[in-house]
Image (spheres, rainbow, N blue to C red):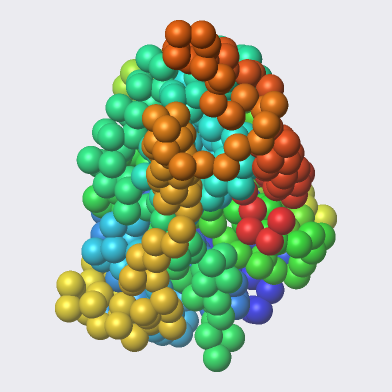
Amino acid sequence: MADDTSIFIGASRKPDDSYQRAEHLLLQYGNRHGLVTGATGTGKTVTLQILAEGFSNAGVPVFCADIKGDLSGIAMMGTAQDFLVKRAEQVKLDPYDFQEFPVIFWDLFGEQGHPIRATVSEMGPLLLSRLMNLTEAQEGIMNIAFRLADEEGLLLLDMKDLQALLANIAERADELGSRYGNVTKPSVGAIQRTLLVLEQQGAAHFFGEPALRIADIMRTTRDGRGAISVLAADKLMMNPRLYATFLLWLMSELFEVLPEVGDPDRPKLVFFFDEAHLLFEDAPKVLIDRVEQVVRLIRSKGVGVYFVTQNPLDVPETVLAQLGNRVQHALRAYTPREQKAVKTAAETFRPNPDFDCATAITQLGTGEALVSTLETKGVPSMVQRTLIRPPSSRLGPITPAERQKLIQESPVAGQYDQVVDRESAFEMLQKKAREAQDAEEQAQQAGSGGSRWTIPGFGNDDPAPQSGGRRAPAPRPSNRQTVAEAAIKSVVRSVGSSVGRAIVRGILGSLSRGR
C-alpha cells in the first residue's frame, strides 16, 4: 500500500462511508513535525504504533515513550484477529503482513530496559530549575552554581556533585555574593531540600555516567530498518516533571549534536513526545520560547518531532504552528473548554467541503481520525475522515519474559548497566576541604612554637624579648598575600577562566558533548 517514499496511514471515506483513497505521510516531509490528538480510548497509541512501524521500515530510527506498556508489543509479530483483518479489508491493505520490529528498551530506573542517564552538567541550569520548580531567586543561585563549576573546572556528574557544590556555595556566600549578586543560605537550603525530594523520587538514577550516547538511539539494522527505542514510562509518570524534563533534554541534545542536513529525502530520526501537555504545563514563558525555537530549527537537523496529547489546546499556538502532519482522533465536547478544543482543532485543518470538521471530530469512532499531511511542495492536504490501518506488530503489551530476552539480546546490552563514578565535584571539593584543614592544622602547630622555616622581616621570626624578660606582643596579622599565595591564586584564576571560555552551553542551557 506504500512505496519507499511514504507511510500508509489508512483510507479516507466518502460521505456515504464508502472507500475513497489511501492516505499517506510523505517521508520527505516527515521532519516537518506532527500532532496526534484525541480523547482517551480513541486510538492514539495505535496511530503512534503504525507511524513508528512505517518509519522503521523506511530506515528511520524512532524514539518514543511507552506510557501504559501497550506500545511494547511493537517488538513482537502481530497475529490475525477478526477485527484487525476486517479493518485491513476496509482500508484495502492487501496483503496484510505481520512482522516484528527491532526494538531497544530503555528505562530511567533500569528495571524494564537499559538504564538511561545524563550528567548534571549536560542537563544545564535552565532544565534543572524547571525540573525542581525553583523560584526566580533559587534559579539565580542554580545559574551561579553552574557558572562556578565551569570557572573552577568542577565536573557535575551526579546529584552528590551538585549537593556538594551547593554546600560549598553556602560556605562562600559572602565571597560569591560580591561577585555574582545576592547568595543567601536559606535559598541554597531550599534547593538542597528539593534535591532530596528528587532523590527520593528516583531522579538519582537518571543523573550519572555512563551517559546516553545519541548514536545509540539512531541505530539501523543490517536489513536497513530503523531501530525503535521505547522508553518504559509507566513508573516514570509518577514523576511527570522528570518525564517531561528528560524528553526535553533529549530533544535539545539532538539539536546540539546533530549536523545541519537541510531537507533530506527522509528524517534522520523521529521523536514522539507522548503526554505532551506535561511539557507545557506551568512552564515559564522563557522555556516555551526556547522549545518553540528548538522545534522550528531542529527540522533542518533531519529530526521530526511528533507531539501526542489529548487536547490540541495543550500545545501553545507558537509550537502548534510548526506541526505540519496532523492526526485528530475523537474529542468530547461536554464542557466549555472541550468545545473550545474542538473548534481549535477544526480551524487548524484545511477545510473539506464534504463535511463539517467540528461536527466530525465529535462523531469519530475508535480507530478513526481526521488526517491532514503535507503534500507536494509542503502544502497541507485537505482534511479527510480516515480509518487508521491496523498494525503489523502485536497489539498490546509483551510479557516480562519476552522483554527480558529482548534486553539481553539488545545491541547495547552491557554498555549502560554499571554506574561509573569517576572523580568529579564531590571528590574534588572534599579534597580541597581536607587540604584546607591540613593547612590550618599546620599553621596552628607553627604558631604554637613548632619547628619551621622563617624569613627575616616577613613577620615569621620570634619577637625580641622586652626588658624584664617578656616578649614583645605579636604583630597583627598581615592581609597581604605572600609571593607563593599570589602565584597559586593567579594559576587557579587562569585555569578557571580558560575552562569557562572553553565551555559553551546550548539553546536550552544543556552542555553538549564534544563542544
Front-lying residue, 330 or 243: 243
Direction from residue 155 to residue 28 in the image, left or right: right
Most extreme residue toward the bottom is 222
The answer to whether residue 254 of the structure is visible from this angle is yes
Residue reaching furthest to the front: 468
Q: Is residue 397 above or below residue 222?
A: above
In the displayed structure image, the side of residue 426 where residue 349 appears, left or right: right
Quarter of the image for residue 316 reads: top right
Question: In this image, 275 relative to 380: left or right?
Answer: left
- Above or below, 79 against 136 in this view is below
Relative to 103, say whether 190 is above or below.
above
Residue 180 in view (yes/no): no
Q: Quadrant of residue 149?
A: top right
Question: Vertical placement of 409 versus 258: above or below?
Answer: below
Quadrant of the drawing holding the N terminus: bottom right
The C terminus is located in which quarter?
Answer: bottom right
Measured as percent of width and height from the top left, residue 286 is found at: 62, 25
Q: Where residue 32 appears, x then y in whole percent?
A: 68, 52
Q: Residue at x 68, y 61 (%)?
A: 514
Name the residue at 56% across, 19% down: 464
Q: Which of 488 and 123 lies nearest the eye of the viewer?
A: 488
Q: Where does the image place residue 285, in percent across and percent down from the top left?
A: 59, 22
- Residue at the spot 31% in from the left edge and 78% down from the top edge: 407
Q: Position of residue 386 (x, y in %)?
A: 49, 54
Q: How many marks?
A: 0
Q: Name the residue nearer the viewer: 53 or 333.
A: 53
> Which of these two is toward me, 423 or 436?
436
